[in-house]
Amino acid sequence: MLSGLPPKHAGKYDVRFAQQLLVIATDMSAALVRGWTHPSCVAQELAVRCLLDQVEVIQDLYGLDLADGWRGRLEGRTLEYTDSEMLYQNALDGFEGDVELNMQLGLAPMDLKDWFEPFNDSCVPAFVR
């Protein structure tokens, strides 16, 4: 899963980060069974994106005939916020460290240290703290 995360931060993914991400990914996978809730932090958004990336790999590998635009429709239903998509755009390199700009744009904190922080007070993923 680490390989599916924004590559510009790859050098910062350490053991603690990987452990937290594993918990997040497991929780988001379980949400598919227990009843979906929108991701509550950037790391959960990224876990969903990695899962959808894997669906694309499987689609190509096995020649699955999925409906046109399936990913966009699924992202629209599963992701309440889509700020994490910006982390993959090289043209926006460095935006995540500009807290003032992020606040002006209404973005969630995007710095790596904030990925596991809840989007708001009603989204507190205590299991990753």
Image: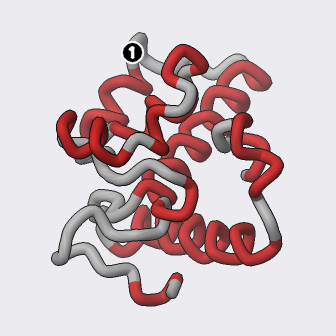
Q: In the image, is residue 108 above or below residue 113?
A: above
Q: 81 left or right of 9?
A: left
Residue found at the far top of this picture: 68
The amino acid sitting under disc 1 is: Gly
61 or 90, nearer to the observer: 90
User: Where, by quadrant of the figure, is residue 105 drawn?
Assistant: top left
As displayed, is residue 128 above or below residue 72? below
Residue 84: which quarter of the image?
A: top left
Q: Residue at x 28, y 58 (%)?
A: 38
Task: State the SS at label 1.
Answer: loop
> Is 120 on the left-hand or right-hand side of 85?
left
Pick the residue in front: 58 or 104: 104
Q: Position of residue 78 (x, y in %)?
A: 32, 46
Residue to which mark 1 is pinned: 69
Q: Is residue 86 depicted above or below 24 in this figure? A: above
Task: Name the colouring of the figure.
Answer: secondary structure
Q: Residue at x 56, y 26 (%)?
A: 93
Residue 79 position, x and y percent, is 31, 45
Return the x and y of residue 74 as percentages of the image width and height. 35, 35
Whether residue 78 is visible here, answered yes or no, is no
